[in-house]
């Protein structure tokens, strides 16, 4: 397991509020890092199911985003039960995986 020395993405953004903020290049790099992590998980037939700012850890400088907290992750060939209040309609239909979410839906 890697040590992520920069905390999580939620704390990172909260610390930047009131200061200069986060520039667009940094935001785009975070999106790319997260997308690559999701792509890898899906290539292994794993669905994270709990992606949120506090579950994205940051490492190094400039920070690299890493997915964490895989407690709710499931294999996609099984029936997945999603917490309905936090799940996009495109992701869950009747408690099962719907079609994959496109990058533009992030």
Image: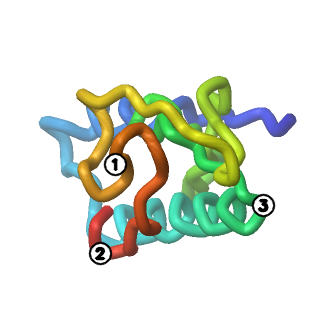
Report x, y in % for residue 97: 48, 52
Determine the secondary structure under disc 1.
strand
Residue found 73% across the figure and 68% down from its top: 43
Q: How many marks?
A: 3
Which is more toward the observer, 47 or 40? 47
Which is more toward the observer, 43 or 3? 43
**Can residue 56 be seen here?**
no
Is label 1 or label 2 in front? 1
- Disc 1 to disc 3: CB gap under 8 Å: no
Determine the secondary structure under disc 3.
loop
Which is more toward the observer, 44 or 27? 44
Q: Which mark is residue 61?
A: none
Report x, y in % for residue 38: 59, 60
Crowding at mark 2 (Cα within 10 Å: few <14, some 14-19, many 20+): few
Residue found 21% across the figure and 50% down from its top: 21
According to the picture, the residue beneath numbered tag 1 turns out to be 93
Task: Tell which circle, 1 or 2, labels the residue nearer the N-terminal end.
Answer: 1
According to the picture, the residue beneath numbered tag 2 turns out to be 104
Task: Tell which circle, 2 or 3, labels the residue nearer the N-terminal end.
Answer: 3
Residue found 34% across the figure and 48% down from its top: 93
The colour mode here is rainbow
71 in relation to 52, above or below: above
The quadrant of the picture occupied by the C terminus is: bottom left
Report x, y in % for residue 8: 50, 33
Is label 1 or label 3 in front? 1
Which residue reaches farthest left?
18
18 in relation to 37, above or below: above
According to the picture, the residue beneath numbered tag 3 turns out to be 44
Determine the secondary structure under disc 2.
helix
């Amino acid at each position: 397991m890697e040590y992520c020395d920069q905390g999580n993405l939620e704390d990172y953004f909260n610390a930047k509020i009131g200061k200069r903020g986060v520039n667009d290049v940094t935001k785009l790099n975070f999106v790319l890092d997260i997308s690559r992590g999701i792509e890898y998980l899906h290539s292994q037939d794993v669905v994270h199911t709990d992606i949120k700012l506090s579950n994205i850890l940051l490492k190094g400088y400039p920070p690299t985003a890493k997915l964490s907290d895989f407690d709710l992750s499931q294999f996609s060939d099984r029936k997945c039960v999603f917490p309905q209040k936090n799940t996009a309609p495109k992701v869950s239909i009747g408690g099962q995986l719907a079609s994959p979410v496109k990058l533009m839906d992030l």
